[in-house]
Each structure stands twice: as structure tokens, then as C-alpha cells.
Amino acid sequence: MALSALAQPALAQQTPRELSTVPAPTPPDTTRPAAPPVLAPAPTAPAPDPRQAPLPPANTTSYSVGLKSGQVLRGYDVEVRSPVFGRTFLLIDGQQKLDLNDVRYYEDQSGFYVRTTLPGRSKRESTLRRDRVGRISLYSITQQQYSNNGFGPGGYSPYGYNPYGYGGFGGYRTVRNEYFSKDNGPIEDLSIRNLQLATTDNAGAQQLLASARRYQTFTTLSYVGAGGLLLAGVLSSFGGSNGFSVSPLMYAAIPLAIVPLAIGGKSQNNVKQAVLLYNTGR
């Protein structure tokens, strides 16, 4: 009996006490990255056919053509045609032909053009390109002219003495003549004197043009002096008793010929600034 009494407490100690307790859940492992979501592949566009060339953008700009009758035409393609035989004409959209004598102005992808007579010339009309718009609008025309003069001084450009007028053997050359119109008035030669008369109501433009006129005078005198010294130097070089020897007069002509290259651009720049100043009304 004593042994059984001692065995009962020992068996009681070996019996689990919390058998009905639910075990705690295992915490998630935060050290392992989450798997990325599986995305369905995006639909791919079909590859372009290399044999099919891309289409150019359609021309959505229409150009205007003003006739002397007052009628204004519009077209998406305006071009000047000069056939070998026949008169030059204007072609609109490849269908409508217009005689240039009936056209007052027209525009195309290269700019705006007017048909008018040039000052001091015959009544035959010429086509001028408009380069600047304003109270004073600038125009120009490029022509091929034949020059048969040999060595000697050149002529005057709109801004002063032409530095390329010395020497040469004649032939055709490209000449760009410039004109202007004030308040859509008659076409005038683009010269400093004419611009001074047209801008008398703007003191700033008058000052710039007066400065351009001084540069023009210096340029002209320098070229005339350089030409005179060069000609005298050539004659003196061949007239010596020892045969040909370079005359010091030829060396003296070099500085006078360089002066216009240094100040010639200033006259042209002053003319442009005067026109800009007058158009802005400052």
C-alpha cells in the first residue's frame, strides 16, 4: 500500500497539464521577399512592312494670288513656269495658268512677291521678293547681268562703293538689287539718301543714316585713293631706267584698300538698324 501511495504522486507529475491548449500560429518569415505578381504579356503591334514607304504629310497651307482686277485666288501649289518658247506664267495647283502681266502679287513656299515697275526704268514690270514687312518694307531682285569692263573702279552698291569693281575680264555675274517702299507706296532704290528723305520723322533713324553716310564717304575715298596709287605705282614700276621694279606707291595703296574692308560693314549695319528702328516706332 505504501508503494502504491508513493507511485500515484509520481504518475500525477508525469501527466501533461494543458492538452486542450491550441498552439500559437507560426509568424511569417519577413526576411524572404514576396514573389512578384505574374503579368500577362502585352499584345505586340505588328511589324511595319518595309516595302511600304511612309506617306508624306499633306500640304495644308494655301497661298494667295492677287490679280490686278482685284480678285484673289488661293491654291496649295503656286509656281512660276518659264518655258523655252512662250511667255512666263503662273501655275496654280498644276491646272490654272495666269499671265504674269495680270498678277499684282503672289506667294509660294519661298516667300512673298510683287509685280511692279522699277524706279527710273522702263514700264516693264519686274518681280520683287519682299524681305521685310513694316512701314518701310524691303524688296530685292536677283538678276544675271553682263559686265564687259576691264580694269578700273567699280560702281556703287545700295550702301556705298562696290569693293568688287576692280579688275576682271567681263562676263555674266549675279547682281542683287535692293529697294524699299514706305507705307505701301511706290518702289524706291534702297540708298542712304532716299532713306533719309523717308525717315525725317524719326530722329534715331536719321542719326544712324547720317553715320552710315560718313562710313560710305570714307569707303569711297579709300577706294579711289587706293586705285589711284595702284595705277601710279604700276606706271612707275615700268617706267624706271633699270627695267621693272616695284614702286613704293603700290605698297602705299594696300592700307587704303584695307580700310573699306574694316568699315564697309558698319555702313550696311547702320542702314539695317535705321530701318528696324523706324518700323518699331522708337
Image (cartoon, rainbow, N blue to C red):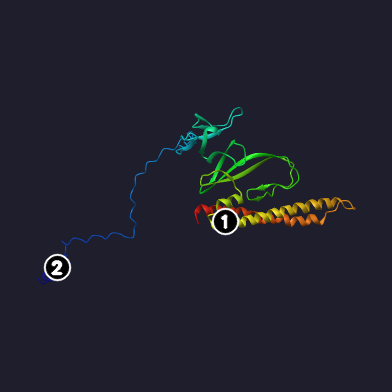
Identify the image quadrant of residue 171. top right
Residue located 65% across and 51% down the image? 160
Residue found at x 69% / y 53%: 220
Q: Amino acid at mark 2?
A: Ala
Nearer the observer: mark 2 or 1; the answer is 1
Element marked by disc 1: helix
Q: Is residue 75 left or right of residue 271?
A: left
Residue toward you, 54 or 260? 260
Seen in the picture, residue 69 relative to 202 is either above or below; the reply is above
Distance between mark 2 and mark 1 Cα atoms: 126 Å
The residue where tag 1 is placed is 206
Q: Which residue is mark 2?
A: 12
Q: How far from the left and from the top, in percent, is residue 264?
A: 65, 54
Q: Residue placed farthest to the left in the image?
A: 1
Quick one: 162 or 44, which is closer to the camera?
Answer: 162
* Local SS, label 2: helix
Q: Residue at x 55, y 33 (%)?
A: 101
Which of marks 1 and 2 precedes in the sequence? 2
Q: Residues within 10 Å of mark 2 (few under 14, many from 20)?
A: few
- Pick the quarter of the image with the N terminus: bottom left
**What percent of the width, then of the height, locates residue 39?**
34, 47
Residue 104: x %, y % from top left = 52, 37
Mark 1: amino acid: Gln
Q: Position of residue 144 (x, y in %)?
A: 65, 39
Instruction: State which quadrant residue 253 falls in.
Output: bottom right
Question: Is residue 280 left or right of 157 when viewed as pictured?
Answer: left
- Count of numbered labels shown in the rendering: 2
- Residue 79 appears in view: yes
The answer to whether residue 229 is above or below residue 48 is below
Crowding at dot 1, Cα within 10 Å, few <14 / some 14-19 / many 20+, comes out as many
